[in-house]
Image (tube, rainbow, N blue to C red):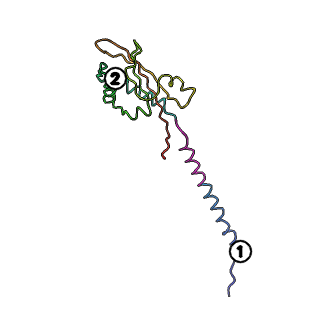
Amino acid sequence: MEIENKKAQLGSQMMIFAFIFLLLIAGIGIVTGIYIFFSSEYDFRQIDAEILNYGVNSCLQKKEINFNVPPQELENEILKKCALHKTVTDNYFLISIKNEADNKILLKLGKGDETRCGLAEKNTQFPKCTNSTVTLKINNNQQTLLILTGSNQNSRENLV
């Protein structure tokens, strides 16, 4: 009969606890890193408004749009020629085109108005807006149009 050498076997068996502890620490670190990275909300509303303003401005300069039609036809023409989607603009954006000379609104798409844009610094739920002007030849007259675009589109939505 042989005698088994049982010295130092308890140390080998106890190493499983250290191994499980290291796996647990690594797992918690990975989950925490992913949560921190994906949980933060980004505010791209100002950038969205500037890109939309640039797009509408260049569309009005390059495309020939007839401003002498009723408002509904003008809205349809601008939506079609500027490649805008009515549902998206109504829900997330504000587009307002006014004549600078008489301050008459030629087109308004989306929710809100200039007042909400002006109060965006006081209320974070209001859209961020940007302005630009474009000079066009309308009815053989040079007219300057004021373009106001705003975005209320948040970076994260509930997917439920």
Of residues 119 and 15, the one drawn nearer to the viewer in this rendering: 119
Of residues 160 and 22, the one drawn nearer to the viewer in this rendering: 160
Q: Secondary structure at mark 2?
A: helix
Q: Which residue is mark 1?
A: 7
Residue drawn 63% across and 61% down?
20
Q: In which quadrant of the rendered view does residue 58 lie?
A: top left
Residue 61 belongs to magenta span: no
Residue 86 shown left or right of residue 41 in the figure: left
Q: Position of residue 10 (x, y in %)?
A: 70, 71
Residue 38 belongs to magenta span: yes
**Nearest-to-viewer mark from 1 and 2:** 2
Q: Three-letter amino acid code at disc 2?
A: Pro
Residue 19 shown left or right of residue 113 in the figure: right
Residue drawn 37% across and 20% down?
106
Q: What is the number of the mark on residue 157? A: none
Q: Crowdedness of circle 2 by 10 Å Cα count: few (<14), some, many (20+)? A: some
CA gap between label 1 and label 2 equals: 93 Å
Q: Position of residue 116 (x, y in %)?
A: 51, 25
Chief secondary structure of the magenta portion:
helix
Q: What is the number of the mark on residue 71? A: 2
Q: Secondary structure at mark 1?
A: loop
- Give the mark, 1 or 2, whose residue is nearer the N terminus: 1
Q: Do the CB atoms of the residues marked 1 and 2 lie less than 8 Å apart?
A: no
Residue 120 shown left or right of residue 94 in the figure: right
Q: Position of residue 70 (x, y in %)?
A: 31, 22
Q: In which quadrant of the rendered view does residue 139 lie?
A: top left
Q: Quadrant of the N terminus?
A: bottom right
Residue 14 shown left or right of residue 141 in the figure: right
- Magenta segment, which residues? 27-42
Q: Crowdedness of circle 1 by 10 Å Cα count: few (<14), some, many (20+)? A: few
Q: How many numbered callouts? A: 2
